[in-house]
């Protein structure tokens, strides 16, 4: 006796309004349905995986059958197909929930040891009203259970219930409740969201943007050294129109690059006296405004500081703290690496410091 994962992928996506059925739309580089399929395979909880689909798909060791005109008819077909195949439990999952986790599968499996029906749900975070005829009534949100999938059942029991069923049902939990059968409801997973409309899809598929930044300044005597907005004790400082902070300049270029907003020179022309001797941390202000106004958020900043001295290990923490303050992001999102150049060239002779940065943003 083994467990079977049934992936329902035959829906017509009437509410999705796209030419392509949503199960096959590309989400994070894969067709939507493949995400939960992969999780089911990786979980190693299932001896059998069955996809119900109206499109021809082929996967090694995975069985595919044609679906019905409605969701419940597809489930019915799947259950009929599994008859006499020694299945103990079935996990019935909608392909439109790509963010299924192995953790949720394990929680469901554990509960199935003591229960014949286990269904994940979420509490409602919105206040709830319901309508009877033309009257709208209040319903306490504490009494609302929003059911998710996979919904898990003892095979024989759900097979028998489906056999008798003549009505359209939108999930298996409805069938159980209709027949006064007991269900163990367990708290589901917020990320296990269902994609129903194209808006849901656009909301979920966060877009990532990457920008690269590079800067180099000559070291000169009698100037203070600023790196990442921090004043560093050193025999020289960086020559430049501003304070010459190579880290901040490279970060600014990286951020502008990711947003496709040209470069630091366009924002702060070096022939303009307005910006003479400007502290580089003030140059971040218009860049952070662009990030905000265009709904970007910073996911990651990776920095290579290229110099023989000062030693990065001695200044790393101060710089990370300063960058985290200046950019208003968690310190964990920033990485600073030091790189020496085997005493080669002007950097090796301690006549210049360079910096390169990659910034990753999402929108
Ligand atoms: Zn610069």
Image (cartoon, rainbow, N blue to C red):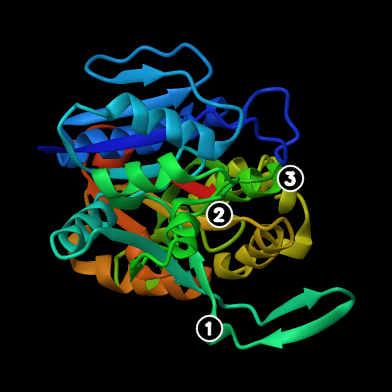
Tell me if the residue at label 2 has its CB under 8 Å from ligand 1. yes
Question: Relative to 182, does residue 90 appear above or below in the rendering?
Answer: above
Q: Nearer the viewer, residue 256 or 350?
A: 256
Q: Which residue is mark 3?
A: 266
Question: Relative to 117, does residue 74 appear above or below in the rendering?
Answer: above
The outermost residue toward the left is: 1
Tell me if the residue at label 3 has its CB under 8 Å from ligand 1. no
Q: Which residue is mark 1?
A: 143
Q: Position of residue 322 (x, y in %)?
A: 41, 73
* Front: mark 2 or 1: 1
- What residue do we see at 63% from left, 46% from top? 196
Find numbered disc 2 in the image and state the secondary structure of the residue it sits on.
loop
Q: Which residue is mark 2?
A: 240
Q: Nearer the viewer, residue 264 or 95?
A: 95
Which mark is first along the chain, 3 or 1? 1
The outermost residue toward the front is: 164
Question: Relative to 128, does residue 207 appear above or below in the rendering?
Answer: above
Find numbered disc 3 in the image and state the secondary structure of the residue it sits on.
helix
Q: Position of residue 70 (x, y in %)?
A: 60, 34
Question: Relative to 31, does residue 244 appear above or below in the rendering?
Answer: below
Specify whether residue 43 is in view: yes
Other residues around mark 2 within 10 Å, as few (<14) / some (14–19) / many (≥20): some
Find numbered disc 1 in the image and state the secondary structure of the residue it sits on.
helix
Specify whether residue 227 is in view: no
Find the distance from the CA under tag 3 to the CA under tag 2: 16 Å
Check whether the beta carbons of the residues at disc 1 and disc 3 lie within 8 A of each other: no
Count of labels shown? 3
Find the distance from the CA under tag 2 to the CA under tag 1: 65 Å
The outermost residue toward the right is: 134
- What residue do we see at 40% from left, 43% from top? 93
- What residue do we see at 43% from left, 47% from top? 218
């Amino acid at each position: 006796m083994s467990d079977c994962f049934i992936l329902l992928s035959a829906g017509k996506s009437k509410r999705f309004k796209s030419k392509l059925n949503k199960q096959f739309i590309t989400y994070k580089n894969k067709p939507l349905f493949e995400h939960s399929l992969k999780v089911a395979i990786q979980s190693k909880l299932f001896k059998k995986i069955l996809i119900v689909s109206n499109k021809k798909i082929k996967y090694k060791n995975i069985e595919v059958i044609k679906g019905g005109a409605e969701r419940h008819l597809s489930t019915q077909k799947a259950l009929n197909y599994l008859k006499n195949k020694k299945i103990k439990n079935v996990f019935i999952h909608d392909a439109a929930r790509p963010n299924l986790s192995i953790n949720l599968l394990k929680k469901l499996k554990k509960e199935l040891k003591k229960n014949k029906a286990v269904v994940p749900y979420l509490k409602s975070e919105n206040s709830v009203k319901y309508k009877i005829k033309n009257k709208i009534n209040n319903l306490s949100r504490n009494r609302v259970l929003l059911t998710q999938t996979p919904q898990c059942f003892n095979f024989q029991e759900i097979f028998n219930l489906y056999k008798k069923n003549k009505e359209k049902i939108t999930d298996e939990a409805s069938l159980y409740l209709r027949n006064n059968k007991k269900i163990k409801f367990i708290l589901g997973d917020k990320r296990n969201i269902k994609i129903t409309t194209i808006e849901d899809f656009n909301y979920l598929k966060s877009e990532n943007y990457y920008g690269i930044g590079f800067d180099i300044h000559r070291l000169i005597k009698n100037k203070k050294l600023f790196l990442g907005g921090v004043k560093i004790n050193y025999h020289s400082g960086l020559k430049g129109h501003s304070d010459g902070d190579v880290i901040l300049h490279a970060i600014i270029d990286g951020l502008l690059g990711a947003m496709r907003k040209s470069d630091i020179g366009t924002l702060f022309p070096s022939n303009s006296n307005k910006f003479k001797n400007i502290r580089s941390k003030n140059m971040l202000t218009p860049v952070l405004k662009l990030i905000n106004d265009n709904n970007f958020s910073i996911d990651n900043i990776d920095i290579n500081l290229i110099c023989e001295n000062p030693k990065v290990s001695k200044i790393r923490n101060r710089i990370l703290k300063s960058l985290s303050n200046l950019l208003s992001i968690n310190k964990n999102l920033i990485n600073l690496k030091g790189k020496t150049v085997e005493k080669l060239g002007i950097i090796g002779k301690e006549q210049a410091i360079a910096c390169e940065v990659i910034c990753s943003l999402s929108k």
